[in-house]
């Protein structure tokens, strides 16, 4: 591949800010999403849970982690608390030790999904919405149909159908969303243990995009996915060498904890850029 071809591919990469910008600010919080918007991320990636009073809220974990959230009282299980109870927790005071550059924002609360959707006026970015749901723990969420309905109603209320995509490891919510609103774009998440052919994953999920853990990406897999009309958006990559490997493999987008850094990397022009890697 020529340097020119590589630079053109880099320029077309769609950047998803994972949990907003977890590398630099508390995950899934308004400050993290605002940072991603200001950086120019194409998508805000966020995770959803549902409170006892059926409010969609933005949290990766159905049980508030002790390592991140402090100050509230009683249960940490989001599905067992009202929104008012959830809002007592401070999820911005403790820096995540896995991200040394992460700044704290004391007093930051878990946002509602609607509070995050309200940021839409600040730009033309999209929302990559992950349903956190598992058939093994049905008590932690509504049913897949109810979950999808809550999401659709919230998105529809703000007229954002064209700016959202829904992703999940649990394809039941993807099927449910397709029944409710067939035009909403869907991403099938798969982890490194899932070695199925991506055509099979697409068929089983009904998704038009495969979102694999990054180690699964090879040029051959991406080529085959593109040949049947799928896009490929791997997660979650924070390393420049790995970004370059994925770009050279032909992926369509990248999910990263540091969207500002990825955007700076994509926009840096030769000769300051590292030489493109050879195809494996
Ligand atoms: O965006 C995909 C990625 O979020 C999947 O991993 O653990 O962050 O949900 P996780």
Image: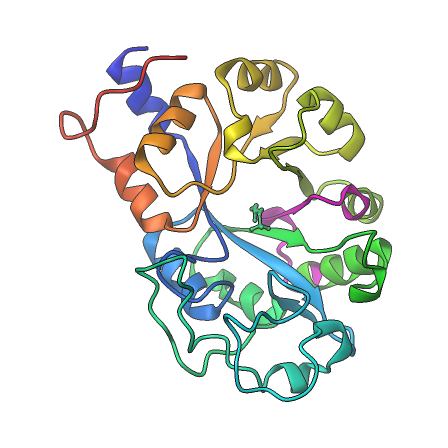
Total label count?
Answer: 0
Quadrant for residue 276, please give it: top left
Q: Is residue 162 magenta?
A: yes
Q: Quick check: 220 left or right of 149?
A: left
Please say whether residue 55 is visible from this viewpoint.
no
User: Visible in this render: residue 197?
Assistant: yes
x and y, in percent, of residue 248 in the image: 39, 20
Residue 60 on image: x %, y %: 60, 60
Nearer to me, 192 or 81: 192
Specify the farthest residue to the left. Answer: 271
* Residue 166 is one of the magenta-drawn residues: yes
Quarter containing the N terminus: top left
Q: Residue at x 36, y 73 (%)?
A: 104
**In the picture provided, is 205 more to the left or to the right than 73?**
right
**Quadrant in the rendering for residue 193:** top right
Residue 51: x, y in percent?
73, 74
Judging from the image, the colouring scheme is rainbow
**Residue at (49% x, 65% y) in the render:** 119
Looking at the rendered image, the quarter that the C terminus falls into is: top left
**Towards the viewer: 77 or 264:** 77
Looking at the picture, does residue 99 appear above or below residue 55? above
Front in this rendered view, residue 3 or 37 = 3
Q: Residue at x 62, y 37 (%)?
A: 191
Figure check: 228 above or below 164: above
Residue 145: x %, y % from top left: 85, 54
- Stretch of the chain drawn in magenta: 156-173
Q: What's the residue at 77%, 42% (across, down)?
A: 171
Would residue 279 appear left or right of 227 to someone viewing this image? left
């Amino acid at each position: 591949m020529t340097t020119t071809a590589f630079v053109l591919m880099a320029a077309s990469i769609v950047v998803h800010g994972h949990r907003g910008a977890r590398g630099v600010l508390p995950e899934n919080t308004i400050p993290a999403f605002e940072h991603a918007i200001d950086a120019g991320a194409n998508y805000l990636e966020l995770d959803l849970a549902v409170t006892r009073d059926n409010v969609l809220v933005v949290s990766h974990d159905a049980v508030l982690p002790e390592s991140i959230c402090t100050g509230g009282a009683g249960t940490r299980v989001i599905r067992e608390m009202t929104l008012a109870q959830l809002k007592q927790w401070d999820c911005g005071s403790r820096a995540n030790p896995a991200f040394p550059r992460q700044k704290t924002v004391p007093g930051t609360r878990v946002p509602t999904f609607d509070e995050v959707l309200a940021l839409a006026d600040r730009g033309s970015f999209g929302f990559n919405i992950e349903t956190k749901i598992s058939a093994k723990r049905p008590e932690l969420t509504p049913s897949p149909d109810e979950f999808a309905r809550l999401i659709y109603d919230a998105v529809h209320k703000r007229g954002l159908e064209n700016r959202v995509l829904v992703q999940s490891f649990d394809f039941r919510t993807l099927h449910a969303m397709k029944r409710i609103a067939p035009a909403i774009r869907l991403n099938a998440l798969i982890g490194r243990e899932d070695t199925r052919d991506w055509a099979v994953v697409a068929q089983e999920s009904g998704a038009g995009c495969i979102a694999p853990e990054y180690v699964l990406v090879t040029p051959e897999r991406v080529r085959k996915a593109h040949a049947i009309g799928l896009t490929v958006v791997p997660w979650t990559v924070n390393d420049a060498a790995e970004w370059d490997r994925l770009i050279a493999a032909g992926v369509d987008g990248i999910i990263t904890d540091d969207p500002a850094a990825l955007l700076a990397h994509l926009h840096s022009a030769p000769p300051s850029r590292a030489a493109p890697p050879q195809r494996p």
